[in-house]
Image (spheres, rainbow, N blue to C red):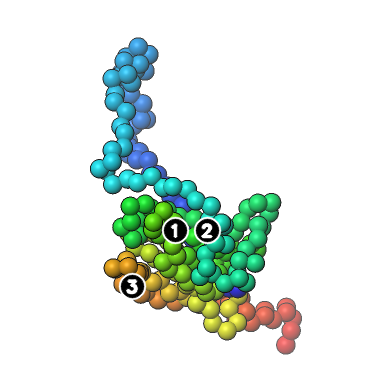
């Protein structure tokens, strides 16, 4: 199976702003402890409300979900084993894809050695059970949730490409319409061969030894 740089399933960060001048400390000096305590006590704690669009994700066992799925072949189920101890090569995401009353689940299955995606599956809760509503079983495939869209990335390999350096990628956007996903957008990216180790070294001639004619 080919390498998935998308794994990798396919993280997040928080930017903290800093002032461009001064030391950043308050000129008035440190705040009094009783003043701080009073301010903290008076500050209400924000709480989520049912109408703010947030939905609690009911955690599921992705391995049990995959092995109970009749749409998945027995070969993949047999190959689905822990990499170390009970750690399976599976990424799981929860989010809104199908406008269901419960969060949908995206499960990405990878290889242990190099985290290459070999299958992406989307599950929707229907009648108190999860149903497979999308699957892509291919070399170097990975699915993510982006603002209600299902984004599936597939690495593209030309003959002779090393696992870590594919020639490009296809990025396909799916949207839920009616009772199924339909393709909404498609983007293909070709990767440069002039950066990293993407085959450029193989094309570089050997240096001529000093003193050679």
In the rendered image, the residue lying farthest to the top is 34
Q: Mark on residue 182?
A: 3
Query: Callout 2: few (<14), some (14-19), or many (20+) C-alpha neighbours within 10 Å?
Result: some
Q: Mark on residue 65?
A: 2
The quadrant holding residue 46 is: top left
Query: Residue 78: x and y, percent?
Result: 65, 67
Query: Residue 105: x and y, percent?
Result: 44, 57
Taking the image as shown, residue 208 lies to the left or right of residue 25, namely right
Confirm whether residue 140 shows in the render.
no
| Residue at (46% x, 69% y) in the render | 135
Q: Secondary structure at mark 3?
A: strand
Query: Of marks 2 and 3, which one's residue comes earlier in the chain?
Result: 2
Alpha-carbon span between mark 1 and mark 3: 20 Å
| Residue at (33% x, 24% y) in the render | 26
Q: Mark on residue 63?
A: none
Q: Nearer the viewer, mark 1 or mark 3?
A: 1
Q: Nearer the viewer, mark 2 or mark 3?
A: 2
Query: Callout 3: few (<14), some (14-19), or many (20+) C-alpha neighbours within 10 Å?
Result: few
Query: Residue 92: x and y, percent?
Result: 49, 55
For label 1, the residue is 130
Query: Of marks 1 and 3, which one's residue comes earlier in the chain?
Result: 1
Q: Is residue 166 above or below residue 17?
A: below
Q: Are marks 1 and 2 in contact (CB under 8 Å)?
A: yes
Compare residues 24 and 182 and report the one nearer the observer: 182
Query: Callout 1: few (<14), some (14-19), or many (20+) C-alpha neighbours within 10 Å?
Result: some
Compare residues 134 and 211 and report the one nearer the observer: 134
């Amino acid at each position: 199976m080919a390498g998935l740089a998308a794994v990798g399933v396919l993280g997040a960060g928080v930017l903290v702003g800093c002032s461009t001048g001064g030391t950043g400390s308050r000129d008035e000096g440190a705040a009094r402890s009783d003043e701080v305590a009073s301010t903290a006590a008076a500050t209400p704690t924000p709480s989520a409300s049912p109408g703010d669009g947030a939905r609690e994700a009911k955690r599921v066992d992705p391995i049990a979900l995959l092995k109970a799925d009749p749409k998945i072949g027995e070969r993949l189920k047999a190959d689905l084993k822990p990499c170390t101890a009970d750690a399976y090569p599976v990424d799981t995401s929860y989010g809104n894809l199908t406008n269901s009353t419960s969060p949908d689940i995206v499960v990405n299955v990878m290889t242990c050695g190099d985290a290459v995606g070999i299958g992406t599956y989307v599950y929707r809760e229907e009648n108190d059970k999860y149903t497979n509503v999308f699957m892509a079983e291919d070399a170097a495939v990975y699915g993510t949730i982006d603002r209600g869209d299902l984004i599936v990335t597939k690495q593209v390999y030309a003959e002779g490409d090393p696992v870590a350096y594919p020639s490009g990628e296809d990025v396909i956007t799916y949207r839920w319409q009616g009772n199924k996903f339909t393709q909404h957008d498609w983007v293909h990216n070709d990767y440069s061969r002039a950066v990293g180790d993407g085959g450029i070294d193989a094309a570089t001639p050997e240096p001529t030894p000093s003193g050679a004619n």
